[in-house]
Amino acid sequence: MTPTISNCFEVSGEDFSRAGEASGKIKTILKQLGYDKDAIRRVAIAMYEAEINMVIHAGGGKAMVDIHPDRVDIVMADQGPGIPDVEKAMEEGFTTAPDRIRDLGFGAGMGLPNIKKYADSLSIETQVNVGTTLYITVRATQQYI
Amino acid sequence: MQIKDVIRILDAEIISGGDLDQEIQSACGSDMMSDALAFVKESSMLLTGLINPQVVRTSEMLDVHCIVFVRGKIPGTDTIALAQERNIVLLSTRHRMFTACGLLYEGGLRGGAE
């Protein structure tokens, strides 16, 4: 049985230009493993959107990624402001991002919808003034050995 | 369409090179990165007016081979360095977004939306 490969990253909220580094590393690892191509793409996009969100709204956080033969489990945990209205946050176009983030091409209110679109499952735990944790799973069509 | 064809059609300047024989099958014009993340297909090219490093990171996630900066925009050294690390070709054209997309469409390239 192929063992689970676990990765953990601290996502810094200090430097927006570095947002996405963790997602890039996971993508590289999956490619090196010869992982299912479609799954790699979906993991990269879902995780990247989540990472960007952490930096925009929560000042960073922690990304934990478990690579199994048949799926990738991603936990993105922050201690930011929390999401007051998850249903609203899932609407395309809804955003609380500041102007300086929009100027960079983000904060258009597509983050959570995109994660949901690319993930096989998305679960959100959030509490105002405590933080938010996203549980994301992407399944591989073909298992890797 | 190959990247070298794009250079000819858009009269584009090469900001950061690479394999210009790479095939481009579709393109997306966007200044909103989440829209690009929602719609861009593989073997794509991104046309954009944004020149910050996140454009390269977004393209990396999407397996975009080539980024065209429109309106004569030239990115800074940090964006260029990131693109070089990731083997993403950077071009710049004086054409506006609408014109650049139109010329490529006329040349046979299509969008990546479903």
Image: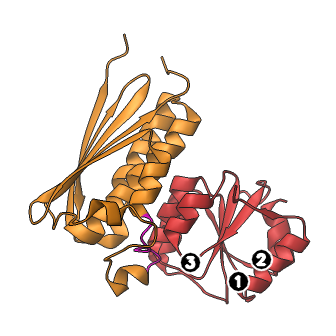
Chain colours: A orange, B red
Q: Distance between the residues labelled 3 and 1?
A: 10 Å
Instruction: Answer whether residue A67 is visible to the viewer in this image.
Output: yes
Q: Name the residue tied to disc 1.
A: B97
- Dots 3, 1 in contact, CB < 8 A: no
Q: Please state if B44 lies on the left or on the right of A48 as rendered.
A: right
Q: Give the range drawn in magenta.
A: A104-110
Q: Mark 1 lies on which chain?
A: B
Tell if the residue under mark 3 belongs to the same chain as the one under mark 1.
Answer: yes
Q: Does A141 lie within the magenta span? A: no
- A19 or A143: nearer the eye? A143
Residue B31 position by quadrant: bottom right
Quadrant in the picture for the C terminus of chain B: bottom right
- Dots 1, 2 in contact, CB < 8 A: yes
Q: Residues within 10 Å of mark 1 (few under 14, many from 20)?
A: some
Query: Is the residue A95 above or below the residue B19 in the image?
Result: below
Q: Which chain carries label 3?
A: B
Q: Earlier in the sequence, mark 3 or mark 1?
A: 3
Q: Name the residue tied to disc 3.
A: B31
- Which residue is painted at 66% across and 54% down in the image? B41
As helix, strand or loop, the secondary structure at mark 2 comes to helix
Q: Which of marks 3 and 2 is nearer the N terminus?
A: 3
* Residue A20 badge: none
Q: Name the residue tied to disc 2.
A: B101
- Which residue is painted at 22% across and 64% down in the image? A83
Query: Is the residue A28 above or below the residue A87 in the image?
Result: above
User: Residue B76, percent across and down?
Assistant: 49, 81
Q: Mark 2 lies on which chain?
A: B
